[in-house]
Image (spheres, rainbow, N blue to C red):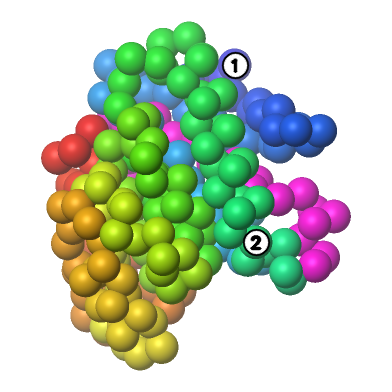
């Protein structure tokens, strides 16, 4: 384990079935809660947007787990990148693994899902007492539309104001979620939140949400 200031960082492998999925686990001192990331299609645990959010969470004393939902071999087939059942199963198993780690088990857990990764994050929260909050960033909740009424964990939808393809989708999903929910539109942002300052807004809103519910 590498210790950096008040952060304990570790590269680990999460056993899921016959696979060992590489992951980056960071646990701050005075841990307030853990956030597990679910990245989008074509991305992985190195996503610069997710790692930016993770750094903001660390500053607020939240731990993070960023892991590869699918293997490089599986990435070749696009169908695997949007396989909600496969990714949901792995997200749930990774959360169970995380709960067993020393110093983590007693805290609350949240999911941060980006793009298509919001689908597994929402699905994995269904009937899951470990999950206390979900954040969807530029998400594709339409991939698990039938499950949304069963999502009772407080859910925050973050959508770019110029992400016209996803605005209607997220508004529909917002109406279906069964528990506490909020929809925030980031002015001027497109799907990847590449515009100056927009990812920082995402990080701040996500941190505030997890601070409220974790």
Classify 45 as above or below 17.
below
Label 2, label 1: how many angstroms apart (C-alpha)?
32 Å
Q: Is residue 58 magenta?
A: yes
Residue nearest the observer in this picture, 30 or 88: 88
Picture disc at residue 131: none
Q: Residue at x 45, y 40 (%)?
A: 36
Q: Residues within 10 Å of mark 2 (few under 14, many from 20)?
A: some
Which residue has dot 2 on it? 83
Q: N-terminal of the two: label 2 or label 1?
A: 1
Q: Residue at x 31, y 71 (%)?
A: 173
Residue nearest the observer in this picture, 201 or 110: 110
For numbered disc 2, what is the local secondary structure? Answer: loop
Which residue has dot 1 on it? 1
Q: How crowded is mark 1: few (under 14 residues within 10 Å), some or many (20 or more)?
A: few
Residue nearest the observer in this picture, 72 or 82: 82
Q: Is residue 184 left or right of residue 66?
A: left
Residue 115 visible from this viewpoint? no
> What is the quadrant of the C terminus in the image?
top left
Classify 117 as above or below 97.
below
Quadrant in the rendering for residue 181: bottom left
Q: Nearer the viewer, mark 2 or mark 1?
A: 2
Is mark 2 in CB contact (under 8 Å) with mark 1? Answer: no
Tell me where residue 23 appears, x and y as whole percent.
63, 35
> What is the quadrant of the N terminus in the image?
top right
Tell me where residue 163 appears, x and y as whole percent.
36, 84
Residue 172 visible from this viewpoint? yes
Tell me where residue 71 appears, x and y as whole percent.
77, 49
Q: Is residue 81 left or right of residue 119?
A: right
For numbered disc 1, what is the local secondary structure? Answer: loop
Tell me where residue 86 appears, x and y as whole percent.
65, 51
Q: Does the magenta stretch include residue 74?
A: yes
User: Magenta region: which residues?
Assistant: 52-77
């Amino acid at each position: 384990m590498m210790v950096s200031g008040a952060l304990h960082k570790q590269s680990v492998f999460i056993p899921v079935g016959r696979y060992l999925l590489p992951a980056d686990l960071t646990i701050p001192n005075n841990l307030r809660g853990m956030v597990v990331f679910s990245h989008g299609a074509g991305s992985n645990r190195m996503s610069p947007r997710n790692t930016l959010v993770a750094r903001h969470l660390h500053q607020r004393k939240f731990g993070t787990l960023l892991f590869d939902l699918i293997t490089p071999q599986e990435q070749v087939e696009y169908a695997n990148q949007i396989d909600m059942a496969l990714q949901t199963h792995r997200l749930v198993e990774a959360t169970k693994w995380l709960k067993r780690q020393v110093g983590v088990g007693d805290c609350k857990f949240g999911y941060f899902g980006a793009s298509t990764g919001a689908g597994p994050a929402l699905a994995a929260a269904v009937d899951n007492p470990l999950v206390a909050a979900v954040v969807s960033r530029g998400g594709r909740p339409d991939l698990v539309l039938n499950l949304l009424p069963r999502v009772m964990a407080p859910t925050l939808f973050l959508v770019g104001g110029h992400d016209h393809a996803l605005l209607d989708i997220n508004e529909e999903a917002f109406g279906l979620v069964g528990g506490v929910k909020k929809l925030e539109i980031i002015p001027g942002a497109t799907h990847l939140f590449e515009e100056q300052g927009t990812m920082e807004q995402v990080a701040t809103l996500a941190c505030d949400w997890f601070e409220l519910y974790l």
